Amino acid sequence: MMTASSRTRKEHTMTLKPRTCEEQVQMLADLHEIQNLFSRFLYLHLAGRDEETADQFAQETPGVRAEFPTIGIYDGIESVRRFYVGAGKHVEDDRLGHLHLHTLTTPVIEVARDGQTAQGVWISPGVETAPNKNGVRALWHWIKYGVDFVKENGTWKLWHLHIYRIFSTPPGQSWAEPTPVPDLNLPEEIRPDRPSSYTWVYSPEVATEHIPAPPAPYDTWDESRAYVQG
Amino acid sequence: VISPDLESRLARVEAAQARSTATHEIQNLMGRYEFWHVANLHQRCLGLFALETPGVRIEVPGGLYEGRAGVERFFLAYHGDHDADRPGSRLDGDMHMHTLTTPVIEIADDLRTAKGAWISPGHETMAGRNPHTGEPLPAKPRAYWAWIKYGADFAREHGHWKIWHLGVYATFLAPYDTSWVDAEHVPTKAALPPDKAPDRFLEDPAPWMYAADKPHLNVPPPPEPYATFDEATAYASP
């Protein structure tokens, strides 16, 4: 289980070895590719291109994971693909009226000194819109992302994707008022492998938490850094 | 004497450095456009466009402004009566704020052009007249959420990156307290007089605008890495 103290600790782990000029230029190219990759992932998700969405994850690197706060954790690329492609078929159906629009703002991205992995966090104002038995439900939907990336055959890929809730609220209603979480009633074939590790969401009765903490500069991958723990 | 290995490493570093600089300049160019737009500095925005490059254009909901003359008409006439640099403009309560998020920016291998896409949460507060139709509005401004996407091509003119094709792809425009599912469509350019009208009227609402009975389209598609500009991938209704 992730705790606030474990994530905060990593913010202060500073690398001591400076990059050469050549390495700094490579790092700038890596930062750009990582931002493009994650943005492109959200465009594909929004457009219901589910196979291509899953393709943005590492296909050969062990330990791919995705955690969704109200659903659970998917372990391994096959499970992550099962979720994205399966949800597209079973939950979105013909996609009429669906709008799952997530943006990326406020980035903090750190590329490992060895250039093989990277970590990033973003704050994401967005909207969720989906038909249900009462019509079409629209929500302002603010979340945060904590993501680990890995270089696979020379290309950056998503490795661990973790979505953290901030609030979901219908247009015209304050986020300080409760909004019931809809029962997703996921079909068996797209259920998660295990439950979520972290389910914080805004309410007047809870304090905000420093999770996910922005990544600190680091030299090489250490599994304890992962935004989704194995 | 520079060794072949060092020469090759230098070339790689120089190419990567040029791409990083271009990416930064393009993000700043688009950011500057948004800051000037919300401050109603529309005449000034003209300087951000590739006015000397054939094919310069702006697509906004409902219409396409083509060529240098079209782009000038858009900023000087369509936006002409609410420009902070023009005395007598009606500016009180008028605010059109569009942000830039979720960037995908690709620089051509030849470094001559670039392409970018952004998702833009924003809001529009309409005062004086409806900027889309020209019709007078009540004294109290009307506030809307305005979420759009941008797809833009960039070209270099005199050593500077400029906006070449700007596509504004609206996702929804909804009163601040109304769901985008329930919001009525606001008609756009049809009522404009000729001196403010686009060169070409476009389908309104556009196929990519949200509606409960439509699927959301991958428009504009985020750019892919590319070697040299291909007109078939151009944004803004080529």
Image (cartoon, coloured by chain):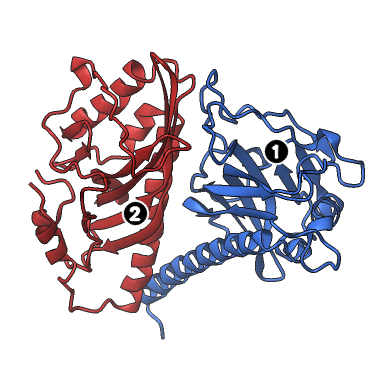
Quarter assignment of residue A44: top left
Quarter assignment of residue A9: bottom left
Q: Position of residue B94 (x, y in %)?
A: 70, 55
Q: Chain B drawn in what color?
A: blue
State the SS at label 1. Answer: loop
Amino acid at the residue labelled 2:
Trp
Nearest to the observer: residue B142 or residue B49:
B142
Q: Is residue A189 above or below residue A67?
A: above
Labels 2 and 1 within one chain:
no
Q: Position of residue A131 (x, y in %)?
A: 42, 19
Q: Is residue A97 above or below residue B73?
A: above
Mark 1, residues whose alpha carbon is within 10 Å: few (<14), some, or many (≥20)?
many
Q: Residue at x 20, y 17 (%)?
A: A189
Quarter assignment of residue B29: bottom right
Q: Position of residue B189 (x, y in %)?
A: 79, 37
Residue hosting label 2: A122
Q: Residue at x 70, y 54 (%)?
A: B164
Q: Give the position of the C terminus of chain B as an image quadrant.
A: top right
Nearest to the observer: residue B33 or residue B113:
B33
Residue hosting label 1: B61
Q: Residue at x 55, y 54 (%)?
A: B108
- The subunit letter for the residue under badge 1 reads B
Q: What's the CA distance linking mark 2 and mark 1?
A: 30 Å
Q: Residue at x 65, y 49 (%)?
A: B125
Chain identifier for the red-coloured part of the image: A
Amino acid at the residue labelled 1:
Pro
Q: Is residue B234 visible?
A: no
Q: Is residue B96 left or right of residue B78?
A: left
